[in-house]
Amino acid sequence: MTVELLKTNPTCKTCRFFERIETRPEEGLCKENSPQVTILLIPQANHITGQMGAMPQPIASWPTVTDDLWCGRYTAKWAKLDS
C-alpha cells in the first residue's frame, strides 16, 4: 500500500491506533483511548426461590471496529505523536 493511498483512505486499517484481531481479519481494536468499562448482565438463578435474575459483571475492553470505518481522531501509522 503506497503512502498516497494511505493519505486518501483514512480508515481504521491505516490508523496507528488500530490493532487487528487475528481470528477476525476485518476487525480490530481501537486503542486511541484507554479501555472502556461495560456492565454485562449475567443470568443467574436464585437457588432459594428458583427465579432467574441477573448479576452485573463489569469488564474493561477497547472498542471493536471494522477496518473500513473512520473517525475524527484518525492518526496515520507513520505520523509522529507529540510527547
Image: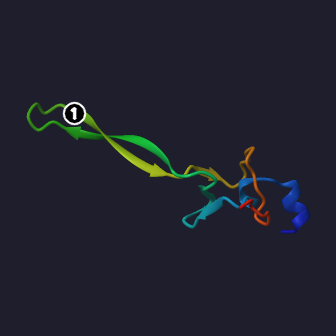
Left/right of residue 35 with respect to residue 3 in the rendered view? left
Q: Nearer the viewer, residue 73 or 48?
A: 73
- Residue 65 screen position, x and y as percent: 62, 51
Q: Quadrant of the N terminus?
A: bottom right
| Residue in view at x 13 percent, y 33 percent | 50
Q: Indicate whether 53 appears above or below 66.
A: above
Quadrant of the image occupied by residue 39: top left
The amino acid type, in three-letter code, at marker 1 is Met
Name the residue carrying label 1: 52
Q: Indicate whether 42 appears above or below 21.
A: above
Determine the secondary structure under disc 1.
Answer: strand
| Residue in view at x 88 percent, y 55 percent | 8
Left/right of residue 1 with respect to residue 52 in the rendered view? right
Q: Indicate whether 15 appears above or below 55.
A: below
- Residue 54 screen position, x and y as percent: 28, 36
Q: Nearer the viewer, residue 36 or 56?
A: 36
- Residue 44 screen position, x and y as percent: 23, 40
| Residue at the extreme right | 4
| Residue at the extreme left | 48
Quadrant of the image occupied by residue 71: top right
Q: Nearer the viewer, residue 80 or 17?
A: 80
Q: Indicate whether 35 appears above or below 78.
A: above
- Residue 37 screen position, x and y as percent: 46, 45
| Residue in view at x 80 percent, y 53 percent | 10
Left/right of residue 62 with respect to residue 37 in the rendered view? right
| Residue in view at x 15 percent, y 36 percent | 46
Query: Dot 1, how many residues are within 10 Å of its Cα: few (below 14), some (14-19), or many (20+)?
Result: few
Q: Quadrant of the C terminus?
A: bottom right
The total number of labels drawn is 1
| Protein image colouring | rainbow
Left/right of residue 81 with respect to residue 33 in the rendered view? right
